[in-house]
Image (spheres, rainbow, N blue to C red):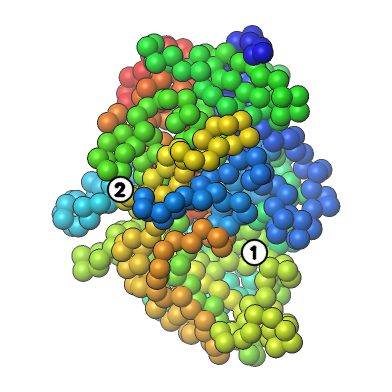
Amino acid sequence: MVQELDPVDVVTIGAGWTGGIVAKELTQSDYEVVSLERGGERETEDFFTVHDELGYALRYKLMQDLSKETITFRNNVDEPALPMRRYGAFLPGSGEGGAGVHWNGQTWRFLPYDFEIRSRTVDEYGEEKIPDNMQLQDWGISYEELEPYFDEFEYTAGIAGAAGNVEGEIQDSGNPYEGPRQRDYPLPPMEDTPVLELFKETAADLGYEPFQAPSANLTDRYTNPDGIQQGRCEYCGYCERFGCEWGAKASPITTVLPAARETGNWELRTHSDVVELLYDEENQRVEGVRYVDRKTDEVYEQPADVVALTAYVLNNVRLLLLSGIGEPYDPETGEGTVGKNYCYQNFQASARGFFDEEAWNLYMGAGALGASIDDFNGDNFDHSDLDFLHGGNIAINQTGDRPIANNPVPEGTQAWGSEFKARSLEYYHSSVSIACQGASLPFRENYLDLDPNYTDQYGRPLLRMTFDWREQDRNLVEHVGPYLEEIVSEMGADTISSSTSLEGSFDITPYQSTHNTGGAIMGSDPEESVVNNYLQNWDAQNLFIPGASAFAHNSGYNPTGTVGALAFRAAEGIEQYLESSELLADV
């Protein structure tokens, strides 16, 4: 029996960064918001005993339960798709705060180039530069339009960094390639360490422009514009895959959710698994959502004036497909939009240096403690004679070498036994890695749809992912890889292990990043996108879908900063819609 509840102004599906920002903004404007979260409640105090590397980093205590719901995967349409039964390439979170609890804190703004990537590519190189099967498109919004929302996210979260471009003036520190910002970061950058200093000195000597990376690991106590207080990072190294017991890593449970709770207008319902959006196709609106209480198995319908689909990327797309909202993407014809432009991240170019005469305290670290160069990112370098587009951020990160997962040894060393143990101890504090976080561009053959063979615990089709590397990805790695080797060599490494080529198909089994994007992309044309530039769905005007599912491609950065900006943009659009009940006029 389905129980219908009293209607509310807004319901969010998920209570992570996107759901939390929407909830905070709308409740502060005196709207009633209910957030449905399929995981449990979380508080900072829950993490005082979480320095358990085996439990959290390797047994995934903060992640989605794959025995209840997973995805199926294949490299191409001629292969059978099989379920991902154990974690590999990416780690979707579960519970209050979502993946914003276990993230590492690296917080970037995408480049101005990213938001107008097709137009800028055609203007600079001609349309023939874009491969026939590359579905490159503009986002329907410019960096300049999105800048105020980036600023709002950074000051809400307390991001630490050094501005490189303030109102068009290039600064002495920071990233000179970033888009112009209206003011500096709210907190100064993280501490330098000997190995980061060595990287920056070497990169500068080679003619690059290094800078300290921006971070959501706070460098001082901070009170944000909502009056929410956060602590200072202690550089313990337990960031990624862990919650922060000090409240010193900005997350939804330390920022936006407490602010929403303080209004008295927000209700969080945990263990609530949304199974369907109640779509009225004739009237082009979503009447509410149907969800299951995981503790009791009771089924509820929650009516709402606005539904904000703020779950993880893959869950956003799956709920749209399950609810029959929008036209599913067809890779054979290129028609349809839901599931289109799935992109990942290309971390395949890297170089690790082993130093015989050096020793650093690499156990000390933080999730976003690092230094970068952007000389090979976006269109910051000439692509005229290159057979790929975009690029990636090159970085060295001192995230804290926890002992179970970090046992670097030179190539040729056995992966077990006495030799492995001796060499891993020898190089535990004497080995550093530099990697390129390469952009992932959209191709016609990479997409998301519903699997015809596998279902979840409720009998609903699982989401199916079809994805493989393309020549674009291989050529990017082959171009950037030798520069990584050069930097490590100039840093003084005695032995170098590197990855400078990309062979074979994408392998979903080893961890790479949780940076899945696309499938419900934004744009200015309903024929080419799922949402407009306020993240409002073209087929259901009271449905808003912020998050990385809206990315038309993935840049050479971590996505969270751009996710946060789009969520603030969506919240503004929701409020305008609640006031007018119309499609937003300036889209």
Q: Is residue 459 visible?
A: yes
SS for dot 2: loop
Q: Nearer the viewer, residue 141 or 522?
A: 522
Residue 577 on image: x %, y %: 44, 17
Q: Quadrant of the N terminus?
A: top right
In the picture, the disc for residue 13 is none
Rendering coords of residue 434 (x, y %): 52, 72
Q: Is residue 212 left or right of residue 208?
A: right
Q: Dividing the picture into quarters, in which one does residue 300 lie?
A: top right
From this view, report whether residue 111 is shown above or below residue 141: below
> Residue at label 1?
399
What residue is at 69 percent from the left and 84 percent from the top? Answer: 420
Check disc 1 and report its element: helix, strand or loop: loop
Q: Is residue 278 left or right of residue 483?
A: right
The percent coordinates of residue 424 (x first, y second) are: 69, 81
Q: Position of residue 394 (x, y in %)?
A: 46, 66
Under mark 2, the amino acid is: Arg
Q: To which residue does mark 2 refer?
A: 444
Q: Residue at x 38, y 45 (%)?
A: 447
Q: Residues within 10 Å of mark 2 (few under 14, many from 20)?
A: some
From the viewer's perspective, is residue 164 above or below residue 211? above
Picture residue at 65% right of the left edge, 56% below the top: 240
